[in-house]
Image: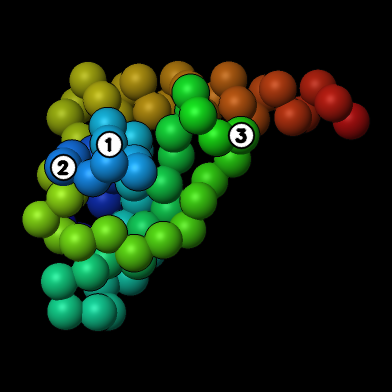
Amino acid sequence: MNRFDLCIVINNVDYKNAFAIILDIDHDDFYHVEIWDFDKVDGAIIDYVNVENLRLATSKEIKEYQKRFKEYSEKYENRQ
């Protein structure tokens, strides 16, 4: 996994199945990530997640993230 890869959080009670974008790889086994859980949180959460709890997103999951992020962005564009 590399910086800015889109991942899926696994084996983590707080963020399981959420999308995560790697921001930095700077704490041994922990990656600094931007977590997007469109069903639970309105916006992103910045946190550290153990690399063992991340896997790269599949192409299908990347498309789902793009769709959900576009919907999220449009929701806030229309509020202005």
SS under mark 1: loop
**Which residue is at a point 44% across and 39% down the rendered structure image?**
36
Image height of 23 relative to 34, above or below: below
* Quarter of the figure with the N terminus: bottom left
User: Which numbered tag is attached to residue 16?
Assistant: 1
**Which residue is at a point 18% across and 40% down the rendered structure image?**
10
- Residue highlighted by disc 3: 42
C-alpha separation, residue under disc 2 versus residue under disc 1: 6 Å
* Quarter of the figure with the C terminus: top right
**Which residue is at a point 50% across and 51% down the rendered structure image?**
45
**Marks 2,1: beta carbons within 8 A:** yes
Q: Position of residue 72 (x, y in %)?
A: 60, 26
Which circle, 2 or 3, is nearer the viewer?
A: 2
Image height of 64 relative to 10, above or below: above
Q: Earlier in the sequence, mark 1 or mark 3?
A: 1
Q: Is residue 26 left or right of 65 when viewed as pictured?
A: left
Which circle, 1 or 3, is nearer the viewer?
A: 1
Q: Earlier in the sequence, mark 2 or mark 1?
A: 2
Task: Looking at the picture, tell me which residue is in the foreground, 10 or 58.
Answer: 10
User: Which numbered tag is attached to residue 11?
Assistant: 2
Which amino acid does the dot numbered 1 rest on? Lys
Disc 2 crowd, CA 10 A, few/some/many (<14, 14-19, 20+): few
SS under mark 2: loop
